[in-house]
Image (cartoon, rainbow, N blue to C red):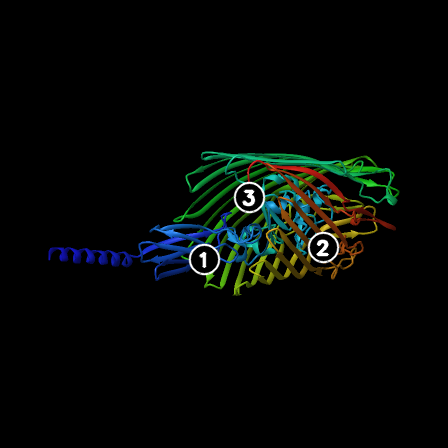
């Protein structure tokens, strides 16, 4: 009898324990990421224990939540484009799930981080028209200069067709989607959230970034991000993200090419406990080429060439798992000859940045940045005789400038379907142009002009996942721009004149609303509406410059450009996301656009001035496609059509109306094609083709630059132990095309040639795997 009672009590105890285990509910939260740390949205997370099941889906920030009434079981996670994962669950309250891509190339082309929302977001969950370039893409591109790498993104152009290897710095501003009609960049270029655009001129020194230090590049086309990034982001945002050492790593590359073009790039980093640090250097030189064609050359024509040296250091420390501090600095030195004996420029630049990041689930993510820059820029201009056998010095310019800025940002998920972002930025720029003027080669006076520019902005953003199909992005930015302490001091034979310009400022409210809607698996629709603005740079306000036979004056009365934009698109993924197609339609209306307007086309030199034209309009379409045949073979391509015209402008007695004319330096059509094969045991091959349609080189549309097509090739072979040998050719068929046309009254314009073939061979070394 006693044994039966004991057995009954034992059986009842087991039943009570089992029922208690299933009756107790555990709250389990977690995040789903890829190997790079990018969050994966829409992943299905399922728990099973016998017949008991619970499931959830990761939200826009990769987070999920499960309520489980079981003591143990299995967690299964699946997401499109990734290998499924299973793991046991033993009452953990927090999980971190890492899914690996189904195809090797997915790691760099599909689920990557983008800065379109100022927080880490999966590329396919961002309504912005974004393109990413990984470090592997960079290594396999034939292009040597970073701006030439970016020309493979349809819609990306510099103010001139020339490569930064030989182009004047003042022509290296970025235009995208036909937004931009002068040398100042209409796209914001960043390195880890620190502006790379020159604070005085707005152009970009593309050689200020050590190539081997780059982890990836993100390109956002269009002004949708202007509410978050402010002035200069009218045409888009380009961000270089630097590598952060997790262990001792060395990455080095050295090559030698035609035109006596050697280059070396080195990045070395290490981590010792909580501390990390890196050092980087970039050295480059090219003898260049003579830009004027043989038939029109004279004694004054000389090669356009450049040389630069760049060194950079970084030191940082982790404070636990939630906080990180860093400080970095660099020194840059560049010399250029601009195609004649007299015309040259020299730049020396030192910059620093320091920042702090803090992130916890309760507080959210907080970041702060402080940065500064000190620059000295020197340039000479000359007048060239019609027969190009003599030239005389006309202007020596020394342009010192300094910039100091800072920013702060906070972001935090609120609930399961919402993320809030808020922040501020401020920057102050001092700059002046000290000019020694010459007439017939003799001193003819001096001018000193310049001022101080201040910008302050605040912004906020709300990212909403409205169900499983719809993502909304609402943001607004408020900007205040002021120009103070501006003056012009002129000294000549007639005496000394001091002109003090009144202080002035303006405000801009830039909202944005974006939507992404998933119709079904692999198909998404996007739509955005936004406002943007760009304040004139000190260079546009107070500095004159000469390009060939055209003298363009600054204009202290310029005011800010303002853009209203709309875009909509469709994205289609097929064949298990191995084939991806995208189309984006855009419409950009700009009031008070700053254009280099010809004032007197018959004078010597031709006179022009930077002016606000009433309105310009750019409409068009971006098409992008990618087909990953296998993990080794991939085809991709892109096309942009941009019809950018002056839609309204008041003509005056000295200048005919330019209404209806194309915006100068904006081609109507651009096409890029690429075929890549990657097999480390055999070869890495990358064949690229680029077509650039015709465009005009002046506002009057009298100087037509014809279309051209170039082909580039890269071949690389691993030798083992981290060593790779490679060969590359840009413009491998040596296509000759015009990059500029300089007007000459009563004569044919003098053309400048684009870069000829650049063939090079090199070695690359990686001490540890990236």
Sequence-first disc among 1 and 2 = 1
Front tag of 1 and 2: 1
Q: Residues within 10 Å of mark 3 (few under 14, many from 20)?
A: few
* Residue 187 in sight here: yes
Relative to 448, residue 580 above or below: below
Q: Would residue 747 be found to the left or right of residue 642 on screen?
A: right
- Give the label on residue 59, or none: 1
Of tags 2 and 3, which is closer to the observer?
3
Residue pointed to by mark 3:
192
Q: Nearer the viewer, residue 440 or 76?
A: 76
Residue under numbered circle 2: 666
- Distance from disc 2 to disc 3, alpha carbons, whole Å, reads 29 Å
- Asked if marks 1 and 2 touch (Cβ < 8 Å), the reply is no
The percent position of residue 624, horizontal first and vertical second, equals 64, 58
Question: Which residue shows up at 50% across the image and 38% down it?
Answer: 246
Q: CA distance from mark 3 to mark 1?
A: 26 Å
Q: Residue at x 38, y 52 (%)?
A: 88
Residue 561 appears at what percent x and percent y? 63, 54
- Asked whether residue 494 is in view, the answer is no
Marks 2/3 in contact by CB < 8 Å: the verdict is no
Q: Tell me where residue 144 appears, x and y as whole percent.
A: 68, 42
């Amino acid at each position: 009898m006693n044994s039966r009672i004991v057995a009954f009590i034992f059986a009842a105890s087991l039943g009570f324990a089992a029922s208690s285990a299933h009756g107790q509910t555990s709250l389990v939260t977690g995040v789903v990421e890829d190997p790079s740390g990018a969050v994966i949205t829409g992943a299905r997370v399922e728990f099973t224990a016998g017949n008991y099941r619970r499931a959830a889906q990761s939200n826009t920030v990769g987070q999920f939540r499960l309520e489980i009434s079981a003591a143990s079981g299995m967690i299964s996670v699946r997401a499109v484009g990734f290998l499924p994962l299973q793991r046991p669950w033993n009452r953990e309250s927090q999980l971190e799930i890492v899914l690996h891509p189904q195809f090797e190339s997915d790691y760099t082309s599909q689920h990557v981080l983008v800065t379109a929302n100022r927080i880490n977001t999966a590329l396919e969950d961002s309504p912005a028209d974004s393109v990413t370039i990984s470090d592997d893409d960079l290594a396999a591109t034939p292009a040597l200069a970073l701006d030439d790498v970016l020309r493979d993104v349809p819609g990306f152009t510099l103010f001139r067709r020339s490569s930064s290897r030989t182009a004047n710095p003042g022509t290296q501003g970025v235009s995208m989607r036909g937004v931009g009609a002068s040398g100042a960049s209409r796209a914001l270029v960043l390195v880890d959230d620190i502006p790379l655009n020159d604070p005085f001129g707005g152009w970009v020194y593309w050689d200020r970034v050590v190539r081997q230090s780059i982890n990836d590049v993100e390109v956002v086309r269009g002004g949708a991000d202007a509410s978050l990034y402010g002035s200069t982001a009218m045409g888009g945002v380009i961000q270089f993200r630097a590598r952060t050492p997790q262990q001792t790593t060395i990455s080095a590359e050295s090559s030698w090419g035609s035109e006596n073009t050697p280059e070396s790039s080195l990045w070395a980093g290490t981590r010792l406990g909580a501390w990390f640090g890196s050092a980087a250097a970039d050295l480059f030189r090219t003898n260049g080429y003579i830009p004027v064609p043989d038939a029109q050359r004279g004694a004054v024509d000389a090669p356009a060439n450049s040389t630069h040296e760049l060194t950079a250091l970084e030191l940082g420390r982790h404070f636990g798992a939630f906080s990180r501090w860093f400080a970095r600095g660099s020194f840059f030195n560049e010399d250029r000859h601009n195609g004649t004996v007299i015309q040259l420029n020299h730049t020396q630049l030192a910059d620093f940045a320091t920042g702090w990041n803090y992130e916890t689930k309760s507080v959210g993510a907080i970041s702060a940045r402080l940065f500064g820059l000190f620059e000295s820029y020197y340039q000479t201009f000359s007048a060239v005789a019609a027969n190009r056998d003599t030239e005389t010095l006309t202007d020596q310019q020394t342009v010192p400038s300094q910039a100091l800025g800072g920013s702060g940002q906070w972001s935090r998920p609120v609930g399961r379907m919402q993320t809030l972002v808020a922040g501020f930025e401020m920057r102050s720029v001092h700059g002046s142009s000290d000019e020694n003027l010459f007439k017939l080669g003799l001193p003819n006076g001096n001018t000193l002009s310049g001022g101080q520019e201040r910008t302050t902005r605040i912004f906020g953003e709300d990212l909403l996942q409205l169900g499983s199909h719809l993502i909304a992005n609402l943001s607004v930015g408020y900007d205040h721009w002021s120009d103070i302490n501006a003056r012009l001091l002129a000294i000549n034979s007639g005496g000394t004149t001091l002109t003090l310009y009144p202080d002035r400022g303006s405000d801009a409210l830039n909202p944005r609303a974006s939507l992404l809607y998933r119709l079904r698996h692999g198909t998404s629709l996007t739509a955005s509406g936004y406002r943007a603005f760009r304040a004139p740079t000190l260079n546009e306000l107070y500095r004159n410059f000469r390009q060939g036979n055209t003298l363009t004056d600054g204009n202290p009365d310029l005011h800010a450009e303002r853009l209203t934009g709309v875009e909509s698109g469709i994205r289609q993924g097929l064949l298990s996301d191995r084939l991806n197609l995208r189309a984006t339609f855009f419409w950009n209306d700009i009031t008070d656009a700053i254009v280099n307007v010809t004032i007197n086309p018959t004078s010597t030199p031709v006179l022009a001035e930077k002016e606000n034209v009433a309105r310009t309009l750019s409409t068009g379409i971006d098409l992008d496609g990618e087909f990953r045949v296998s993990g080794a073979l991939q085809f991709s391509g892109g096309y942009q059509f941009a019809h950018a015209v002056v839609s309204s402008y008041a003509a005056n007695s000295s200048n005919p109306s330019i209404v209806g004319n194309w915006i100068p330096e904006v081609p109507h059509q651009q096409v890029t094609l690429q075929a890549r094969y990657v097999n480390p045991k055999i070869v890495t091959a990358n064949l690229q083709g680029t077509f650039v349609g015709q465009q005009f080189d002046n506002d009057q549309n009298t100087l037509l630059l014809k279309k051209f097509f170039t082909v580039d090739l890269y071949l690389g072979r691993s030798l083992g132990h981290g060593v790779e040998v490679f060969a590359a050719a840009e413009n491998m068929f040596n296509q000759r095309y015009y990059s500029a046309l300089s007007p000459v009254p009563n004569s044919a314009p003098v053309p400048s040639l684009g870069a000829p073939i650049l063939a090079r061979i090199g070695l690359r070394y990686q001490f540890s795997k990236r």
